[in-house]
Image (tube, rainbow, N blue to C red):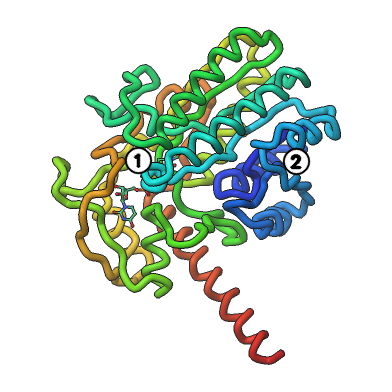
Amino acid sequence: MNTILVTGGCGYIGSHTIVDLLEHGFNVISIDDNSRSTAMAITGIEKITGKKIKNYTVDLKDYNDTRAVFQENEHITGIIHFAAYKAVGESVEQPLSYYENNMFGLINLLKCVDEFKVPHFVFSSSCTVYGNPDKIPVTENSPIKEAESPYGATKQMGERMIKDFSHVVANTACILLRYFNPVGAHPSSFIGELPIGKPMNLVPAITQTAIGKLPKMFVHGNDYDTRDGSCVRDYIHVCDIAHAHTLGLQYLMQEKNTTRCDVFNLGTGNGVTVLEAIKTFEKVSGVKLNYEIGNRRAGDVVAIYANNELAVKKLGWTIKYDVDAMMKTAWDWELKLKEEEDLLKQQSLLN
Ligand code: WQD
């Protein structure tokens, strides 16, 4: 049976994409070493879809283990590659681990794509490839400037590697999907973002502060040249991002010319500041957030949001969730996590 391999399938965007693929009739397997995720996501996927998913706990940096998955599954017709480290701030502090993990994993995967002639490859890229753009919104043809972080540099290098690879490997068509800021959770609250340790991204920092896991959160600077001084981002619901991957695979499967490597921006086209995101969260949750204005964060881009017309037109993509829904689903997920933690505490007290 034709199978789609999702790397990082236990992760935030990977798990939401598997749900969307299953709901659109694809057969899916996952590779995830669970170094930054848990198998809890697989349980959530099964609760939502009623379908069982096999996850291979393989580190893509191990070529032999990675190749063994392809040997065991000879009908892999498409790959969606999510597995990578993705925290901008952390990458500034630990550049080598980002280059090692994100680049070696991709190289091993592409070697298998070549050997096993996998016809379709979707790469999880990022708006961080644009660096600090001179002009916003950015289109897919906006200049690729100096990356502001090692994370962004790994995405720039990854795109270049895949473009060069797609021009010499005749049987593989690729697309690069540049996400802006994925946030929120599946409406069922069975899957969502599960940061390991202290959250580095904005929305989990908001929800963990609101629920009391964190005493307070800091806005990383309000002295930028923006409408309220805080950074501007294009927040996009993770379910909208997930469905764009299904559409991307379908686009590749209809594509005749396999030497092309198309690029698509996945953003809403709207810029939202950090302070506006916090205000929206307070509105939809009814919780007053305990935050302070702190220092700027190294690696931060001042302002970026997408021109998403190409994805809308060529992939037939439509955005279903607004910022209110992004914050509401993120909050519902955090409440669900707390409910489950409290239940576990009660059970351990009873045992
Ligand atoms: C957003 C804004 C922070 C935490 C993300 C992903 C990256 C890529 C691009 C997909 C910034 C501010 C944050 C906090 C804050 N996406 N912030 N207080 O850096 O834009 O990168 O999107 O590939 O993978 O990480 O997202 O959520 O970390 O920050 O003020 O406690 O929120 O300074 O201005 P970022 P982020």
- The residue lying at 60 percent from left, 44 percent from top is 14
Label 2: state its secondary structure.
Answer: strand
Q: How many marks?
A: 2
Considering only vertical position in the picture, is 300 above or below 330?
A: above
Q: Is residue 296 visible?
A: yes
Position of the C terminus, as image quadrant, is: bottom right
Considering only vertical position in the picture, is 35 above or below 122?
A: below
Callout 1 touching callout 2 (CB < 8 Å): no
Comparing labels 1 and 2, the label whose residue is closer to the camera: 2
* Disc ID at residue 29: 2
- The residue lying at 52 percent from left, 55 percent from top is 193
Q: Amino acid at mark 2?
A: Ile
Left or right of 290 in this view: 100: right
Q: Label 1, on which residue?
A: 234
Q: Amino acid at mark 1?
A: Asp
Quarter residue 29 falls in: top right
* Disc ID at residue 46: none
- The residue lying at 78 percent from left, 47 percent from top is 54
- The residue lying at 57 percent from left, 11 percent from top is 260
In depth, the one of 18 and 7 nearer the eye is: 7
Where residue 216 sits in the image (x, y, percent)? 31, 69
Where residue 145 sits in the image (x, y, percent)? 31, 23
Label 1: state its secondary structure.
Answer: loop
Q: Neighbour class for label 1 at 10 Å: few (<14), some, many (≥20)?
A: many
Quarter residue 252 falls in: top right
Where residue 270 sits in the image (x, y, percent)? 32, 39
